[in-house]
Amino acid sequence: MIVADKKPVEEIIEYVKDCKKVLVLGCNECVTVCEAGGKKEAGVLASTLRMYFANQGVEDAQVDERTLERQCDHEYLEEIREIADQYDAIVSIACGVGVQFTAEKYHSIPVFPGVNTCFLGVTEQRGLWTERCQACGKCILAYTGGICPVSRCAKRLFNGPCGGSSNGKCEINKDLDCAWQLIIDRLIAIDRLDLYEKLFDIKDWSTDRAGGPRKVEREDVQI
Amino acid sequence: MSVKTPSKLEKIMAAGHLGVTSECGPPRGSDPEVIKEKAGLLKGCVDAINVTDNQTSVVRTSSLATCIHIKLMGLEPILQMVTRDRNRIALQSDILGAASFDIHNILCLSGDHQSFGDHPQGQNVHDLDSMQLAWTARKMRDEGTFLGGNEIKRPPEMFVGAAANPFADPFEIRVPRLAKKIAAGVEFIQTQCIYNLDKFEEWVRQARERGLTEKCYIMAGITPFKSAGMAKYMKNRVPGMDVPDDVVKRMADTPKEKQAEEGINICVETIQRLKEVEGVAGFHIMAIEWEEKVSEIVERAGLLPRPEID
Ligand code: SF4
Ligand code: SF4
């Protein structure tokens, strides 16, 4: 899933402090799972903003909350078509994708991000999410024991590890597993250490961020 | 091994002599005198001088510019290049730049992570990794083409090296990792500082068994301790460093004013022992900010005079 983290509320207040009517817009997907931008968080943020306006003596301020199934699909975003116009601003607490799609759709309404979108990752345990993929566009997991050096090695080494790998941990932080230790452990477990000895070709980064904004176009599923 | 480049270091080791290298860290400013002074201390006692590339991710004068200063002094530089700061376009361009000054040695590294340095908020590049950089340097030299396939007019002629840590984790791949570097085109290796001689000798033995010492020159890394504190620090704080307890104890048991000398003694004994190890082709003496001691170490270890080769 896409993992996001809450933005400091002071930052959000700074965005909307001059607005009278604000809509806090949550999303039911990834950001709900990572407890940053779902229905619960939309409620908490909306109350915080209400309290802020009340404390400032702004009596006619109105903060509403709404949570959509997804903010990255036309279908669900259309649900606020009727009401969107009445707001001075929307604070979207979906990931950066949701924020942008909302802004694209409601062209004349300011849309502010309410979370920091962090990475593609997993829930390791409640309250702990960690990165697994950087969407490089050409997945190489078949050769690295199912562990991604692009997202999990601090230097995205393809023929790692670097000299700093120590006791299974990465040189940049003792709490961080060295991706290459994990890769070697996995290759041993699946009896494919031979894969390590093959020099990894230089990566084609044109399918990554480097190649410019990307798209996937599939005629077979287009209507 | 036959000689493939005009590198003096390569020629010396190919002729069967033990090679000797040391290093020179560029200054945190643009004063060329600092470079000349440091490099001058190494004149006559080493065959080539490594020039670090923004070591520990701290901004310094560029490795390439410093190499040029050293080359103009009539000494032989080894251009260190990390893959942290430059993409494949910039790396190849700097290789050409170095070649245009007839710099004949390159050491390919991934580089310390930028979080260790003075610009921890910077982006890192890592378009290639160190093995891929070595492969690139070989392709440019041997095939005379860029990575993109186009021909290079007057290709670089560089002796291609890399670093290796015989003590690094995961231990299962210590030797396979060396094999992989050699397969990528690495022709000489400079190792991490060696204090655990038994473990190092075991690594060389395994490398020898796989025939790797026939394909690549292994230069043993040597760093003198200036004090017992430094020995402890290296043991406990530097990732991937193996400093046995008895070495730390030896330093700690030495009176403070004699510790620096004892550090040098340890180096000299290390070199004398490793000289006899089959598969050790030379020594890389890293006396960081203590360059004036290199000549003493080299002399006492019986590595002088340096062979003359044309
Ligand atoms: S190789 Fe690329 S696509 Fe595959 S997990 Fe890593 S970043 Fe994601
Ligand atoms: S220690 Fe491991 S994860 Fe960290 S940069 Fe080095 S190889 Fe990558």
Image (cartoon, rainbow, N blue to C red):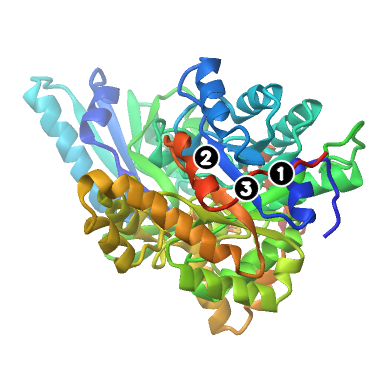
| Residue B72 spot, x, y in % from top left | 70, 21
The type of residue carrying mark 3 is Val
Rendered image: mark on residue B82: none
* Residue identifier under label 2: B295
Give the residue type at disc 2: Ser
In the foreground, B141 or A153: B141
Of the 4 image quadrants, the one containing the C terminus of chain B is top right
- Give the Cα separation between the discs numbered 2 and 3: 11 Å
Query: How many neighbours does mark 1 have within 10 angstroms: few (below 14), some (14-19), or many (20 or more)?
Result: few
Read off the chain for label 3. Answer: B
Is any part of residue A3 visible from this angle?
A: no
Q: Are marks 1 and 2 on the same chain?
A: no
- Residue B120 in which image quadrant: top left
Which mark lies nearer to you, 3 or 1?
Answer: 3
Whether label 1 touches label 2, CB < 8 Å: no
The residue drawn where x is 81% and y is 43% is: B147
Please name whichever residue, B156 or A158, is drawn nearer the observer in this view of the structure. B156
Label 2 element class: helix
Q: How many marks?
A: 3
> What residue sits right under mark 1 in the picture?
A206
Q: Which residue is mark 3?
A: B20
Q: Nearer the viewer, mark 1 or mark 2?
A: 2
Above-or-below relation of B44 to B230 = above
Above or below for B232 versus A82: below
Q: 10 Å neighbourhood of mark 2: few (<14), some, or many (≥20)?
A: some
- Is the distance from the Cβ of mark 1 to the nearest ligand 1 atom less than 8 Å? no
- Which quadrant of the picture is home to ligand 1? bottom right
Please report whichever mark, 2 or 3, sits nearer to the chain's N-terminal start.
Answer: 3
Secondary structure type for disc 1: helix
